[in-house]
Amino acid sequence: MQLHIRFLFFKCLLVLYLFFANLIIKAQQVPQYSQMALRPALFNPAAVSNAHAISLEGLLRGQWTGISGWPFSQTVMANMPLPGISSYGGLLLSNDNAGALRSTNFQLRYAYAKKLQNKQRLAFGIAGGIMQVGLNGDELITPDGNYSGSIDHIDPFFPAITTNAVAFEVGAGVYWNNQKWYAGLTTERAIATKTRFNFENGNLLLKNQLHTTFNVGTEFWLTNIITLHPNAVVKTNFKVLQTEALLIAAFSEIYQIGIGFRGYNPNSIDAFLLYGGILLNKKLSVGYTYDITLSGLRNTSSGSHELGIKYQKPLLFKSAKGKTLYNPRFL
């Protein structure tokens, strides 16, 4: 049974990843997603412990569409519980392009969860993987370059071809929840490795900065069919602070609508967020976010579009006495 579950897990991941990979056109080094608050496992390995079934998630985002070289990001996650040891495992694959930079990330995740008093739960998680970064030289423009017909940067340092480099990634996180509240804290790229591009006439170093993210959220019933889900995410690399808040109303636990905002410091709002989602059945849900640009890019950008898909396959566990127990929890 466990072998069959693992096979199904990796088969579904491969199919989902190939679907999204075929849509790749452009990316950036640290992906920006407006549905982060709804999918904490996207950035916090400890939140992998929310997987009470085989969980597959995919995200597509086109940011600042209408601008030349606009960022395009894709991420696929697969998470599942490891029966009998209060542990959870996961994989994350992502592609991100923005202008001349392209990055591809692969991570393995592990989380351990401990039940506490008063129906509380505390989880710890770690993540490790590799990141391949590509610098597309034919999309670079130098002040003295000649780009009529052929590409000539007239600069011996920059190549006119794509150059790739590889760096390692390590992250860790903690995640707490009870029946109504949840909160998490995580660090990404905890080890400040450097991405080295080796050119014919020199090299270029990109330092991977530490990123820390905190998220918090709750839910409560407004009426007997409407629930409200306020949540917030704060991210920082200790140089720039980004805040994001999202309020979602769920109707009969099937339909969702939401509004929110994102800002890059306490005094600025970068975008206004509109969200809609639907639970198609107990296994499949879809969410869409449209970002209305409010920054200085609003005159040239057509906004940002983001699509999220989640599929969950319930698991069959066996108790110590040999009875089959069905796990109905999907959220």
Image (cartoon, rainbow, N blue to C red):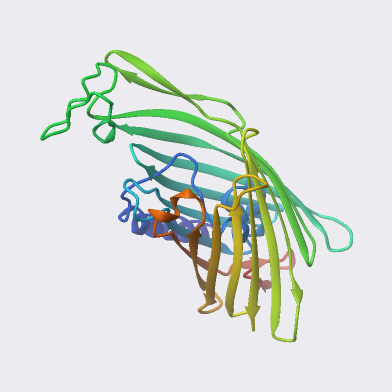
Q: Residue furthest bottom?
A: 224
Residue 104 percent location from the top left of the image: 41, 41
Q: Residue furthest top?
A: 201
Determine the image quadrant of residue 108: top right
Q: From where the camera sits, is residue 139 visible?
A: yes
Determine the image quadrant of residue 198: top left
Question: In this view of the protein, which residue sits in the foreground, 273 or 137?
Answer: 273
Residue 183 percent location from the top left of the image: 74, 54
* Residue 259 shown left or right of residue 144 in the figure: right
Q: What residue appears at the point 55 percent right and 63 percent down from the top-left corner?
A: 273
Q: What residue appears at the point 37 percent right and 49 percent down from the top-left corner?
A: 70
Residue 274 percent location from the top left of the image: 54, 67
Residue 76 percent location from the top left of the image: 46, 54
Whether 293 is drawn above or below 95: the answer is below
Whether 41 is drawn above or below 325: the answer is above
Q: Residue furthest left?
A: 149
Q: From where the camera sits, is residue 1 visible?
A: no
The image quadrant where one finds the N terminus is bottom right
